[in-house]
């Protein structure tokens, strides 16, 4: 029993010593601190010592509230994942500017001016040199795979703008107390990396985004376009109630659902349902998010045309420049369609 107890104590001491010396798997804070130190030394021969003071997972709102006031905020971009963030104390930023402009870290007082994109650019070499090393240290850990491929993005002007840019549900916040050039300058650097979605880990459906409910309420205007005609501006301005315009004979059998800007959502066939004009979506070619090429080209002459009267009491330009045409004369003869999109 005594020998077993002694061996257990020795094993615990050995494990503790190994952790103190950097053995075993890399933790996120230790990998960050080590990557920053190696990058600073490789770039400028600068001694950078980082000590972890905070390491926790928070909601996006709470993480943004922990950023603080007088810090330079830089977005960390990712090709396919949510954005991250890094925040530099003014003293650390001044030290990085010193070493890149004067070749050494000084003790000159830091000014209180507003941060500029140039200040953010001065941190880019350190960020872009440290993050690949950081990712390499964690590459053998599957639960850290979401931290790969982050890079310097752009300056963010204030914590409020940063909270809008952080588009994940939860973030891992790591705060480092950083010393430059044997304590010539010291301050704090904060990293915010998005946590992977729990729904993704368990194979369930992804949770809705933070802004989904608001975005679903945003109005989107969609028009049903039956035909397009081209007339001179003089003639358009001269139109009066009772005038008639020739349109293609195909207008009664086809239509396009078009968003603002000319993007065609779907094409279909015009008809009627329950006494309303309707479009059966899918009866024809479908082009999602592509400009309507026919809008830029005049219709070729047709052998037969339909005459559509301009309704009285309405201007020809009531709806963003589109002619508001009265279709009551032709809707009665339209076929009845099922599973249609009502207009």
Image: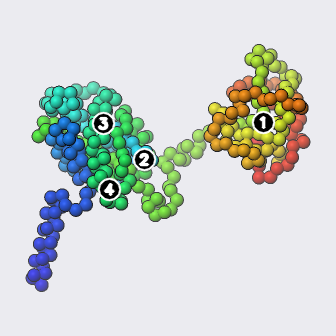
Callout 3 secondary element:
helix
Q: Residues within 10 Å of mark 3 (few under 14, many from 20)?
A: some
Is residue 50 placed above or below 2 in the rendered structure?
above
Mark 3 highlights which residue? 124
Q: In this rendering, would 250 be left or right of 119? A: right
Q: CA distance from mark 4 to mark 1?
A: 56 Å
Residue at 88% over, 37% down: 330
* Earlier-in-chain disc, 1 versus 2: 2
Callout 4 secondary element:
loop
Q: Which is nearer the eye, 293 or 242?
A: 293
Residue 82's disc number: 2
Q: CA distance from mark 4 to mark 3?
A: 22 Å
Report the quarter where the C terminus lies. Answer: top right
Q: CA distance from mark 1 to mark 2?
A: 41 Å
Query: What colour scheme was applied to this rendering of the protein?
Result: rainbow
Q: CA distance from mark 2 to mark 3?
A: 19 Å
Residue 139's disc number: 4
Mark 1 highlights which residue? 226
Q: In this rendering, would 285 be left or right of 143? A: right
Q: Position of residue 155 (x, y in %)?
A: 36, 34
Residue at 17% over, 27% down: 102
Q: Position of residue 302 (x, y in %)?
A: 85, 31
Report the quarter where the N terminus lies. Answer: bottom left
Q: Nearer the viewer, mark 2 or mark 3?
A: 3
Q: Determine whether label 1 and label 2 are within 8 Å by CB.
A: no
Residue at 67% over, 42% down: 287
């Amino acid at each position: 029993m005594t020998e077993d107890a002694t061996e257990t104590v020795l094993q615990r001491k050995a494990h503790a010593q190994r952790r103190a010396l950097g053995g075993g798997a890399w933790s996120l804070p230790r990998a960050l601190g080590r990557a920053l130190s190696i990058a600073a030394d490789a770039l400028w021969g600068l001694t950078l010592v980082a000590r972890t003071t905070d390491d926790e997972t928070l909601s996006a709102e709470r993480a943004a509230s922990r950023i603080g006031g007088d810090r330079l905020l830089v977005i960390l971009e990712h090709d396919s994942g949510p954005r991250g963030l890094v925040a530099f104390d003014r003293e650390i930023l001044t030290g990085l500017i010193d070493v890149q402009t004067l070749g050494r870290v000084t003790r000159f007082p830091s000014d209180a001016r507003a941060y500029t994109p140039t200040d953010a650019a001065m941190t880019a070499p350190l960020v872009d040199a440290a993050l690949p090393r950081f990712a390499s240290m964690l590459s053998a850990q599957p639960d850290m795979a979401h931290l790969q491929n982050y890079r310097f993005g752009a300056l963010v002007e204030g914590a409020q703008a940063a909270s809008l840019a952080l588009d994940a549900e939860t973030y891992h916040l790591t705060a480092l107390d950083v010393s430059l050039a044997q304590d010539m300058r010291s301050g704090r650097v904060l990293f915010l990396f998005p946590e992977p979605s729990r729904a993704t880990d368990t194979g369930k459906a992804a949770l809705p985004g933070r802004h989904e409910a608001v975005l679903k309420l945003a109005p989107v205007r969609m028009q049903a376009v039956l035909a397009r005609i081209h007339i001179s501006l003089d003639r358009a301005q001269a139109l009066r109630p009772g005038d008639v315009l020739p349109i293609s004979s195909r207008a009664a059998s086809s239509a396009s659902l078009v968003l603002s800007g000319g993007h065609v959502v779907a094409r279909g066939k015009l008809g009627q349902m329950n006494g309303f004009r309707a479009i059966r979506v899918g009866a024809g070619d479908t082009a999602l998010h592509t400009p309507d090429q026919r809008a830029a080209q005049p219709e070729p002459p047709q052998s037969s045309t339909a005459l559509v009267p301009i309704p009285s009491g309405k201007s020809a330009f009531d709806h963003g420049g589109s002619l508001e045409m009265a279709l009551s004369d032709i809707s009665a003869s339209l076929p009845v369609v099922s599973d249609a999109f009502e207009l």
